[in-house]
Amino acid sequence: MIGTLLCYVLLPVARLLHALRDAFFTCRKNVLLAKRTTTHIDGLSVPISGKPVSEEQQALLQQWLEEGAGELHTNESASEPEKVSAISDAEWMKGPELLMTSLSNLNVSPQSGSQEQQQPPMVQTEVSPGLQEFVEATVASLPAEGREALGDNALWAAVRTQADPQIIEAAPLSTEVWIEDPAVLAWSPAQETEVVPTEGAVWPFQNAGQFQPLPLEIPYHEILWRDWEDLSAQTCIPELGSETGFLFEFRVMSYNILAQDLIEQSPHLYMHCHPDIMNWSYRFTNLLQEIQHWDPDILCLQEVQENHYWEQLQPTLMMMGFACIYKRRTGRKTDGCAICYKQSKFQLISTSPVEYFRPGLDILNRDNVGLVLLLQPLFPENLGDKSVRPLCVANTHVLYNPRRGDIKLAQMALLLAEVDKTAKMADGSYCPIILCGDLNSVPDSPLYKFIRNGQLYYHGMPAWKVSGQEEFYQNPHQRKLLTPLWPSCVGITDSCQYASLCQSKKSDRQKYSRDFLLQFRYCDAACERPPDLILLEGVTDAMPDCPAHWPKELTVVNNTDPELFCSRHPGSIQHDLNLTSAYSHFLPERGRPEITTMPMGVGATVDYIFYSAHPIKNDNEECRRMYQDGALKLLGRLSLLSEDILWSANGLPNPFYSSDHLCLLASFGLENSDF
Ligand code: KL2
């Protein structure tokens, strides 16, 4: 009976809803595209890189447009996906040169030609011979398809990072790679050849339900360009080399790299992507190149599949100078979070994996995890005995379910409690903190405000509102957040601290629980008016009436439950960590929000790099809290993109960015503790 109901009623209804949702996103995308400022450049003779296009290239392009692109576009409407695949593959073979030019210059800034000559290399990421050997072995162990994608020198040619980290020195890439496999390596060192943009990119979400060919015509390197924003001018930095002040500089990346198993579990989310760019070999290579290109000192990864971590990511990152710590999700989920740090820059003091799952508790019944490290920054020897305080680094991937904001808040509270414990120094102050992750909550949502403002009044709030992911969720039986959000047995106070630690630290200040003190409400001493209290007739001279049932003799019940010693705050939660975001969540020059991911073609920010700063006193407590940099200075960040830009590049993942999230990258300076 239930089976019949499921098969004949619920399934068709679910499919219908799904189709309607797809149609909605398609419409939305078309509206966006109509508004979009054009990113392509008309005409064949306008080269992106500013260098003239050779006649040979023009002829090739013309030929490709006549023979290839035309067919590609007519086949776009073909109903059977297999047919589209076969024909499009053939088309790529026809235009390998063009394919190469479109994707191999991705790393070259439109202005890089001139800048490259002006700026001497600052940082150089050399690939050690050991790494080269290891990579060759790894590549040899990959399936044939992966080896073709890697080519001879694609990933491992040394990439020099210069003052502007986007500028790289190009090494030639073998053309066979492109001919062998259309799954080209987007982050490979750039070619000498110029990019020739053309019109008529194939838009991803128009034909929901079938993948689209690789959008060869898009000049990726131009539309997906991410600027490095130098913020050091706005920061008060101690003079370098001076006696007192010194900045320890480091770069932090947060990246949800999209676990392969999750793609396989929800293939409908990636129908707009060509299968060739979704295979792990391609994505792994591309992701690694991106990481290598930006050269972070601390790397917080989410959605790291366990087998990929142990077999590929960890060994490869180790060869790149990182030490890595991994925490897999609980239950049957195969992915987890990793924090990797450059061993030349940090020494590990402590590691704390955090599991949010608590058996038997509805509010904590999901398998998400977090990871908190305490790292000691290491100074180069030539700087003498400079010292800085340790750095606390946290990473997490919070529950996705947009309707369960209650769970998300409880998960955050658990992570903040661990951060509080790890970052608290012997003198009671906190060391600098970096908190990265995919919080599955948008900016200015209650969860975001809780992290940034340090408090949230949640009582009565609909659970779906917490993350701000769904604006119009209406359900008469919607779940509401009630006090207390989590039971005392979790062992975390409303101030997001471990109750056990809170008891010992606060035992002097807060010896008696509220219930304990209430027992003395009507005793003579409590009813006596203090002599310095202003006398207001009928107010401060009134003696409270003792209720009839109140016992005449006071029998004090001393409740020793540690929870009672840490006051709970009805309906609200707090934390003391003073965290602010490295990103502003808005692109002023484009007048649009920044986005870090694009589920179903809708852009949103859900990934963050928070760091500890000094709150600026604000009389209006309701307002967004303001911060100024403290010991940690935000020196720069890699700009994010807007939704319309990513629309024009086939959404996410695309051949260039191999995850459904963009990476976040921020540069910090840590002040010398003596300063
Ligand atoms: O938004 V995410 O994507 O941070 O990249 O985190 C989760 C979602 C990830 C791990 O659970 O899987 C994705 N619809 C869309 N995406 C989903 C869904 C869903 N129902 N469930 C999980 N994810």
Image (spheres, helix red, strand yellow):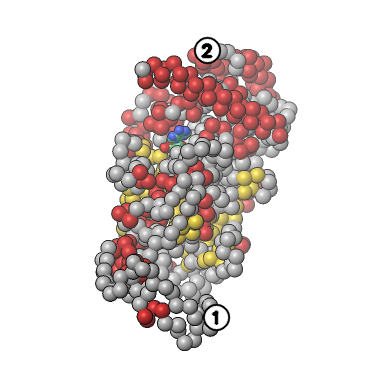
Q: Which residue is drawn at 35% across and 57% down?
A: 492
Q: Which of marks 1 and 2 is in front?
A: 1
Mark 2 burial class by Cα count in 10 Å: few <14, some 14-19, many 20+: few
Left or right relative to 14: residue 29: right
- Residue 634, quarter of picture: bottom right
529 is higher (above) or lower (below) than 74: below
Left or right relative to 641: residue 58: right
Pointer 1 and pointer 2: residues touching (CB < 8 Å)? no
How far separated are the C-alphas under marks 1 and 2? 87 Å
The x and y percentages for residue 357 are 32, 45
85 is higher (above) or lower (below) than 584: above
Q: Quadrant of ligand 1?
A: top left
The x and y percentages for residue 365 are 34, 42
Please name the residue that numbered disc 1 is placed on.
537
Mark 1 burial class by Cα count in 10 Å: few <14, some 14-19, many 20+: few
- Secondary structure under tag 2 reads loop
Residue that sits furthest to the front in the current view = 548
Q: What residue type is labelled 1?
A: Glu
Please name the residue that numbered disc 2 is placed on.
80
- Secondary structure under tag 1 reads loop
